Image (cartoon, helix red, strand yellow):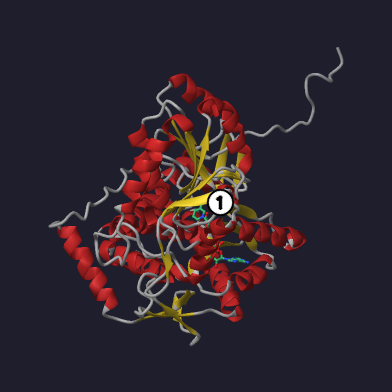
Amino acid sequence: MNNAYFDFVEPKNEPVLSYAPGSAERKALKKAVADLKSQQCDIPAYIGGKEVRSGNKKEIRPPHETGHLLGYFHASDEQQVHDAINAALAARESWAATSWEHRAAIFMKAAELLATKYRFKMNAATMLGQSKNAYQAEIDSACELIDFLRFNVHFLSQVYKQQPLSPQGMDNRMEYRPLEGFVLAVTPFNFTAIGGNLPTAPAMCGNVIVWKPANTQVYSANVFMEILIEAGLPAGVINLIYPSGPVVGDICYAHPYFAGVHFTGSTGVFQSMWKSIGNNIAKYKSYPRIVGETGGKDFVFVHPSSNVDAVVAGLARGSFEYQGQKCSAASRAYLPANLAEEIKTKLVAEVKTMKMGVVDDFTNFINAVIDEKSFESISKYIDGVKNSNGAAKIICGGKCDRTKGWFVEPTIIETTDPSYVTMCEEIFGPVLTIYVYEADQWIQTLDVLDKTSPYALTGAIFSQDRHAIEYMTKALVNSAGNFYINDKPTGAVVGQQPFGGARASGTNDKAGSILNLYRWLSARTIKETYVPPTDYRYAFHQAD
Ligand code: NAD
């Protein structure tokens, strides 16, 4: 029962710790990494508040140290998918009826636990399981996830505040109901924060969830589930299971109470989901909400007036941080001929200073790519340069080494063909392709950029000419959902740069913003008339 209007004020972004030599956080994180490495985990699924161990154990190994065993998780079968749906639906009524301030308190408490007690364990799990360096783990699994939780609580209290007009004699209200069924959250490997956000954003709105993370993110997903349980999340509200993608899909999309999917991952998987949902459309109680943020082929366009050092830093960080495995990573750059040589020389020199290796050694900037499948796929693009008949050449990096982990050197390809395959396809690894254009052709080259790829996720322009900046901003209006001026195309912060792309990159429902939360709510409008009319007749049809 609410006897007051409860508001949650706008939070501040969680400060990013530096992990500089000698700092307390560096010591604590190193200890957390060593602790996790000294034990073997045995990760269960979580269904209806119970830990479930199928016995079908899958190994978890750090991508940068495949000789080390971190432990196991118990893969889920078809029955577990049915059990998770049933557990979610059983929890639905009481969760939907739980007062907003109590639902909010659970997620605010989870944010607080993550910011304090669990911060180093969570970062260590992300470093080891997903091969992120300390800084990349801090900005993802600590800060971004804390921000998602706190900001979404704030945004949702703003949604609840929005009410229609009530002229004299009546009361009009809007009630923001959760969806009638369960929501499926399917999450990718590359961000622990996305893994946490996709189930909690709809859950906060009163929905119940079946959550399937990528197998390569189970290690840190399990830490987040520990936090949610300690924060008091009731049994069955979020059910975490590990079936294969097609198994979870086939069962969920055929269920009459399938109410929506919150997905982040590749474009191909999202398109196949949408097709299956469409094929089942007549089975559902309501039209499911389909929210997906997917692949990208993110660009950096350098105008002839650009500051070279800013371009070099933007490309070095934007292309190679977290081994280029960010959906927003810069993977194609258009350089003007007047600056190209200087940019290439400086960039190659910078990239050669990037140390590559295990996450335990904090001096490494580059770690491993996520798994063998990814290693193989990235290596193929690099090998392909050799057979490009001169259309492309490698100007930096290019070595792939699988002896100790899935290591791919940060690689720069230069091509003379703006449609060369690595200018068009998402590679999802540390590979940047450069195309040099004639400086007086910059307007025509914008058009080439816009038409080269089906994606429109992120993109950056560099220039010191205000007229050119304005022109490019307009010319590329549909080329990216997150557009950067004189900055790298990565590093969106919750509450500051709401994230999502258009075209083949997703439904652009902007994770970590109020827009996303509307998708998990079904508003009911209530009109109450205090003194209703008692006669159907109006004045206009009375005789003169
Ligand atoms: P992926 O598509 O391989 O997997 C994503 C999730 O979908 C995983 O949980 C996977 O198990 C599941 N899945 C796979 N096949 C399925 C099926 N047939 N049915 C249902 N689920 C299925 O993606 P990934 O390799 O984990 O992540 C990388 C991709 O994610 C890249 O394409 C990247 O651009 C994209 N991404 C996009 C954003 C964004 O905000 N736009 C953010 C992060 C990652």
Which residue sits at x=67%, y=70%?
Answer: 250
Q: Mark 1 is on which residue type?
A: Thr
Residue 172's image quarter?
Answer: top right
Which residue sits at x=26%, y=64%?
Answer: 120
Q: x, y percentage for residue 417?
A: 59, 43
Q: Please give the count of numbered marks on the rendered protein.
A: 1
Q: Nearer the viewer, residue 460 or 122?
A: 460
Q: x, y percentage for residue 479?
A: 57, 38
> Could you say whether the residue bearing mark 1 is in a helix, strand or loop?
helix
Quadrant of the displayed image that contains ligand 1: bottom right
Q: x, y percentage for residue 358?
A: 31, 67
Above or below, comparing residue 330 to residue 230 in the picture: above
Q: Nearer the viewer, residue 192 or 83?
A: 192
Q: Residue furthest front?
A: 390
Residue 315 in the figure: left or right of residue 501: left
Near mark 1 (Cα within 10 A), the count class, few <14, some 14-19 or many ≥20, is many
